[in-house]
Every structure is written in C-alpha cells, then in structure tokens.
C-alpha cells in the first residue's frame, strides 16, 4: 500500500481496512484519577496499565525520586523538549510533587508561561 497525494491509501486490492492506535483517549485524559490530565487535578500516576501489571513506576516516582539528569533525558527523548534540563531542575527543586496540577504549575512557572 502507498499513500496518494490526497492522503488516501492506494492498495491495489491488498488492503481492506486499517486500524490505528493514535495514543491516549479522551477517557484517559478526562479522568483525573488516571493522572494524565492537566485540566483536572489528580494523582501523578500516568500509567496506561494501573492494574499493577504495568509495574509500579508512576510519574510521581519519576519526578520525586529520579536524578535531574534522568528526568531531563526522559523529557528530551520522549517529549523532544529543548528545555529538558531546566525543567528537570525546576521539578526537583519543587519536590515533593504529588498531583498533576502541581506538576503543571511547576512546568508553567519554569517555562515562564502565564
């Protein structure tokens, strides 16, 4: 299959459908208890699998226990954040950070955003 100039797939009859997983859903973002939302205050969790099968590593563990260089590396590698080192230092200075609203405030203030 290949994409035509108009974005539609040209399949030569080989493809009858396509299913895409484009990331998180509004259910995950709108549910404060999931820890993904910055609109609704919730615990810093951010695990896709909260059943325990996904491990115990939460966003709270990362921001409160990891070294600044480790936090910066995550922000750079997975978020392509140019200010990753500065943000990591701000997060570490604000410890303990336990909610999504606290983390959002720390990042907003460090970035100089209103």
Image (cartoon, rainbow, N blue to C red):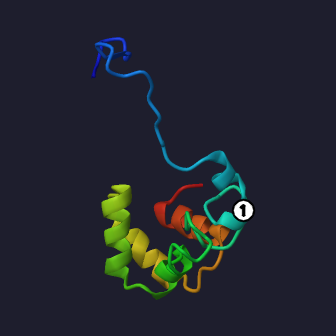
Query: Where residue 12 sits in the image (x, y, percent)?
Result: 28, 13
Pick the front one: 37 or 88: 37
Q: Is residue 112 left or right of residue 1?
A: right
Query: Where residue 21 sits in the image (x, y, percent)?
Result: 48, 43
Q: Is residue 85 visible?
A: no
Picture residue at 66% right of the left edge, 67% below the top: 101
- Circle 1 Cα neighbour tier, 10 Å, few/some/many (<14 / 14–19 / ≥20): many
Q: Is residue 92 left or right of residue 81?
A: right
Please tell me whether mark 1 sits on a helix, a strand or a loop: helix
Picture residue at 55% right of the left edge, 85% below the top: 95
Q: Is residue 69 visible?
A: yes
| Vertical relation: 107 (above or below) 97 | above
Query: Where residue 31 sits in the image (x, y, percent)?
Result: 72, 58
Pick the front one: 18 or 5: 18
Give residue 96's quadrant in the image: bottom right
Picture residue at 59% right of the left edge, 80% below the top: 97
Image quadrant where one finds the N terminus: top left
The residue indicated by pointer 1 is 32
Q: Is residue 17 left or right of residue 42?
A: left
């Amino acid at each position: 299959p290949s994409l035509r100039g108009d974005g539609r797939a040209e399949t030569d009859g080989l493809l009858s459908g396509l299913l895409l997983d484009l990331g998180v859903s509004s259910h995950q973002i709108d549910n404060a208890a999931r820890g993904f939302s910055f609109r609704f205050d919730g615990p810093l969790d951010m695990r896709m699998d909260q059943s325990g099968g996904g491990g115990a590593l939460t966003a709270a563990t990362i921001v409160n226990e990891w070294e600044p260089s480790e936090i910066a590396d995550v922000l750079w590698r997975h978020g392509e954040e140019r200010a990753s080192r500065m943000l990591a230092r701000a997060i570490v200075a604000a410890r303990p950070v336990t909610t999504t609203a606290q983390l959002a405030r720390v990042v907003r203030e460090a970035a100089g955003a209103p």
